[in-house]
Image (cartoon, rainbow, N blue to C red):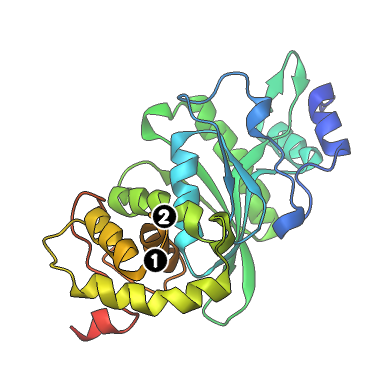
Amino acid sequence: MTNTLHKTHLNRLKDGRGQGQGESYIPYIQANDNKVASEGWLTRTPGWHSNRIHHTLSKYEYQYFLVQEWTDQITDIREQYPLPYEDTQRIAEKLNIRHPHLDGHDVVLTSDFMLTVIDDNDSLNDQARTFKPIHKLTKRTLELFEIERRYYKEVGIQWKVVFDVGRPINLIKNIDWLHDAKRADTRPGMDSEVVNMIAEPIFEKLKQYNTKLSISKSCLRCDDHIGLEPGTSMFMVKHMLANKRWVTDMTVLIRESAPLVIDLPGQREMK
């Protein structure tokens, strides 16, 4: 016989958590729900795809989230995605596995991410992802994975476990560095019209400077030469890279104290 659902989890479901898509989606678990952060990480990050705040509960979740933000084939990211508890209770009972529980009551099982992906046929499909550091694998973890796996097999959604090995650390750090500059209006006085007006002169001026000069110094010189408020050119570098209107080798760690080679899309491939 299945157990009753924990009151806190019932209330979350009643509040609409785990429902919606895109901007309307409400994560089932939010950063402020956890009194103790996993490994000290709780983040609330404005999303590129969704135009809402994303809640990640660990360093690894945040890093995986950044990579999905950068991926062109991703159209929506729903983190802390709940599985229907009636189904997971049924599956757990069938497998003779103890359902996730707290204080004697079952709780909702969640997947770290539900991604909406554009496939090779330009169709949208959902893919579930669960992130787990290898050193945290236990017999109990594998049992919960099996409940997830069985559920997603039943509903026909691809599900995979992502481990912490082989992470593209330089790419992750670079996306983190430029992430806040995706939208022009995050900088006071900046909008798309201003961006289009100053993008070309900034690009041309940055290309003229000696490649031995750090990007920080190059941007300050550019601000001074064009007559822009200090910091504008650096913001533009981040903004244009985030929107892939300028490109650089994202596998090489970007340091503001080092030179940065930028190009227009297509030019890098021709070199």
Above or below 118: residue 168: above
Q: Is residue 38 visible?
A: yes
The amino acid sitting under disc 1 is Leu
Rate crowding at label 1 as few (under 14), some (14 to 19) or many (20 or more) other CA atoms within 10 Å: many
User: Closest to the observer: 206 or 119?
Assistant: 206
Q: Position of residue 201 (x, y in %)?
A: 35, 77
Q: Which residue is mark 2?
A: 178
Q: Which residue is mark 1?
A: 241
The amino acid sitting under disc 2 is Leu
Above or below 90: residue 184: below
Circle 2/circle 1 CB separation < 8 Å = yes
User: Closest to the observer: 122 or 219?
Assistant: 219
Q: Quadrant of residue 206?
A: bottom left
Q: Is residue 252 visible?
A: no
What kind of element bears circle 1?
helix
Q: Position of residue 261 (x, y in %)?
A: 22, 67
Q: Is residue 257 left or right of residue 43?
A: left
User: Closest to the observer: 137 or 41?
Assistant: 41
Which is more N-terminal, label 1 or label 2?
2
Question: Residue at 69% across / 34% down in the picture?
Answer: 92
Q: Is residue 183 left or right of residue 29?
A: left
Above or below 163: residue 246: below
Rate crowding at label 2 as few (under 14), some (14 to 19) or many (20 or more) other CA atoms within 10 Å: many
Q: Position of residue 49 (x, y in %)?
A: 60, 62
